[in-house]
Amino acid sequence: MKLSVKVEYACRVLAQLARHYGSQELAHIEALAKAEEISPNYLAQILGDLRNGGLIISRRGKFGGYALAHRPEAITLYDIVYVIDPELIEFQVGQEGASGKRVSEVWAEVQAQFVKALKEHTLESLAEDRGEEMYHI
């Protein structure tokens, strides 16, 4: 399976926002882009998708920026993937041929386990500080 760059970047920027959850300051796109080494233009597209998907809030203007719409422990990897790249979790396998039905059943089991794992991991776990250098927004 290949994870899209867009999903990876969305996870990274959300982890950055999770580290600042609860503060009164909104994160600026320039600071987020610099901290996560993402093009500001591409990040703007991702942030738009995340806002439209209800995972973040934004405010325009001089004191504007971005923040999580929910607590980090309430946002799962499933939520992120569903908003950014739903095809990653919604695959279909045909049932044609002598083996099609069984192949489809096995892939459905794999899909169910994948979805279960995505729902078990939260944004909070992505934002954990494990002694790495941390950037402040």
Image (spheres, grey):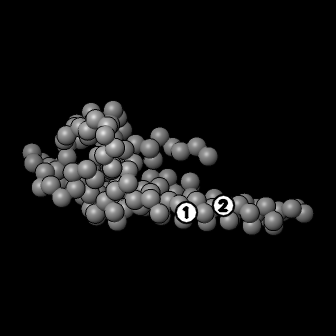
**In the figure, residue 136 lies in which quadrant?**
top left
**In the figure, residue 2 lies in which quadrant?**
top right
Question: Residue 110 versus residue 26: which sits nearer the camera?
Answer: 110
The mark tally for this picture is 2
- Badge 1 marks a residue whose secondary structure is helix
Question: Residue 6 versus residue 74: which sits nearer the camera?
Answer: 74
- Badge 2 marks a residue whose secondary structure is helix
Residue 31 as seen in the image, left or right of residue 121: left
Identify whether 100 is placed above or below 36.
below
Q: Are marks 2 and 1 in contact (CB under 8 Å)?
A: no
What residue is rendered at 18% in x and 58% in y? 22
Amino acid residing under circle 1:
Val
Amino acid residing under circle 2:
Val
Does the rendering let one see residue 33?
no
What residue is rendered at 28% in x and 64% in y? 70
Identify whether 105 is placed above or below 34.
below
Residue 88 position in % (x across, y down): 56, 54
Question: Residue 106 versus residue 38: which sits nearer the camera?
Answer: 106
Q: CA distance from mark 2 to mark 1?
A: 9 Å
Residue 132 position in % (x across, y down): 32, 37
Identify whether 2 is placed above or below 99.
above
* Circle 1 crowding by C-alpha within 10 Å: few under 14, some 14–19, many from 20: some
State which tag comes first along the sequence, 2 or 1.
2
What residue is rendered at 55% in x and 63% in y? 115
Residue 94 as seen in the image, left or right of residue 137: right
Say which residue label 1 marks.
115
Say which residue label 2 marks.
110
Q: Which mark is residue 15?
A: none
Residue 7 as seen in the image, left or right of residue 17: right
Identify whether 96 is placed above or below 2.
below
- Image quadrant holding the C terminus, namely top left
